[in-house]
């Protein structure tokens, strides 16, 4: 079972790292998932990730208080707006835009109702 948790953690961390450069893919949720998986499989990787200078503070904020930094909220909002604008400019069908808009609105409500 530890091997499954380890592989899952590595996959989540890989997706999180891709999300650093690809704005459509979120980084922190994948790093949180990786931390969860590593806690069940590898003490060394769990410690490394929670103490990482870039990802560690976000993970600690979420773990301790369920908080998301104001900077991350603002960046996510700009990215979500940009993605939706791109969808509109691409001329996607109204039904798809409606589904996307509702989904992104729910994400933004969740994001902005978390403590900072």
Image (spheres, helix red, strand yellow):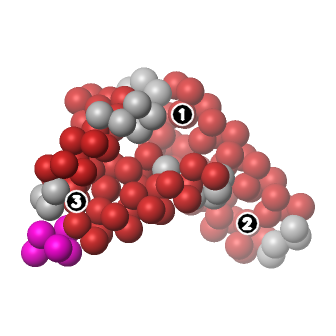
Query: Residue 116 location in percent, x, y?
Result: 42, 24
Label 2 or label 3, whichever lies nearer to me, is 3
Q: Which mark is residue 37?
A: 3
Query: Residue 86 location in percent, x, y?
Result: 82, 58
Magenta-colored span:
1-5
Q: Secondary structure at mark 3?
A: helix
Query: Residue 26 location in percent, x, y?
Result: 52, 53
Q: How many marks?
A: 3
Mark 2 = which residue?
Answer: 97
Q: Earlier in the sequence, mark 2 or mark 3?
A: 3
Label 3 or label 1, whichever lies nearer to me, is 3
- Mark 2 → mark 1, Cα distance in angstroms: 25 Å
Tell me which corner region of the image, top left, top right, bottom left or bottom right, holds residue 62. Answer: top left
Residue that appears at 14% across and 50% down: 43
Q: Is residue 37 magenta?
A: no
Q: Earlier in the sequence, mark 3 or mark 1?
A: 3
Question: Do labels 2 and 1 touch, CB within 8 Å?
Answer: no
Camera-side residue: 55 or 45?
45
Q: Earlier in the sequence, mark 2 or mark 1?
A: 1
Q: Secondary structure at mark 2?
A: helix
Task: Report whether residue 67 is seen.
Answer: no
Relative to 77, is 42 on the left or the right? left
Label 2 or label 1, whichever lies nearer to me, is 1
Query: Residue 44 location in percent, x, y?
Result: 19, 48
- Mark 2 → mark 3, Cα distance in angstroms: 34 Å
Task: Using the image, determine if residue 100 lies above or below residue 69.
Answer: below
Mark 1 = which residue?
Answer: 72
């Amino acid at each position: 079972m530890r091997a499954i948790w380890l592989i899952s953690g590595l996959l989540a961390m890989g997706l999180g790292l891709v999300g650093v450069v690809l704005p459509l893919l979120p980084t922190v949720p994948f790093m949180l998932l990786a931390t969860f998986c590593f806690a069940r499989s590898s003490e060394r990787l769990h410690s490394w990730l929670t103490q990482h200078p870039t990802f560690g503070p976000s993970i600690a904020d979420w773990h301790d208080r369920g908080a998301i930094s104001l900077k991350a909220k603002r960046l996510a909002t700009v990215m979500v707006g940009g993605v939706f604008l791109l969808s509109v400019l691409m001329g996607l069908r109204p039904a798809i835009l409606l589904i996307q808009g509702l989904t992104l609105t729910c994400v933004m409500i969740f994001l902005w109702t978390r403590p900072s």
